[in-house]
Amino acid sequence: MTDWGPVVVATVLFVLLTPGLLCQIPGKGRVVEFGNMSTSGLSILVHAVLYFALVTIFVIAVGVHIYSGSG
């Protein structure tokens, strides 16, 4: 059986935490900006740290598992 949990969690969080897509932390004019489709080096760093923390929490601490296949 193949465990697809970490792959699904990483893909969903990567899409949701892309800087500028849904939100940007820190924004150019405010702390948080929503849907501005722009980014900066600092926001890339902040989103990367958030991504690593959330992937670690969901995959290791919570233990999300999605099994597929036979066996």
Image (cartoon, grey):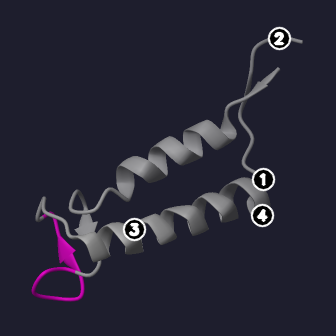
Q: Is residue 24 visible?
A: no
Q: Residues within 10 Å of mark 2 (few under 14, many from 20)?
A: few
* Mark 3 lies on residue: 47
Above or below, 31 against 57 in this view is below
Above or below, 9 against 60 in this view is above
The N terminus - image quarter: top right
Classify mark 2: helix, strand or loop: loop
Relative horizontal placement of residue 10, taking residue 68 as reference (left or right): left
Q: In percent of the image, x 16 and y 88: which residue is there?
A: 30
- Label 4 vs label 2: CA separation? 26 Å
Residue 63: numbered disc: 1
Type of amino acid under label 3: His
Residue 70: numbered disc: 2
Type of amino acid under label 1: Gly
Q: In percent of the image, x 20 and y 70: which residue is there?
A: 40
Type of amino acid under label 2: Ser
Type of amino acid under label 4: Ala
Nearer-N-terminus badge (3/1): 3
The segment highlighted magenta reads: 27-35
* Mark 4 lies on residue: 61
Q: In percent of the image, x 28 and y 62: which residue is there?
A: 19
Residue situated furthest front in the rendering: 41
Residue 38 coordinates in the image, percent (x, y)? 13, 63
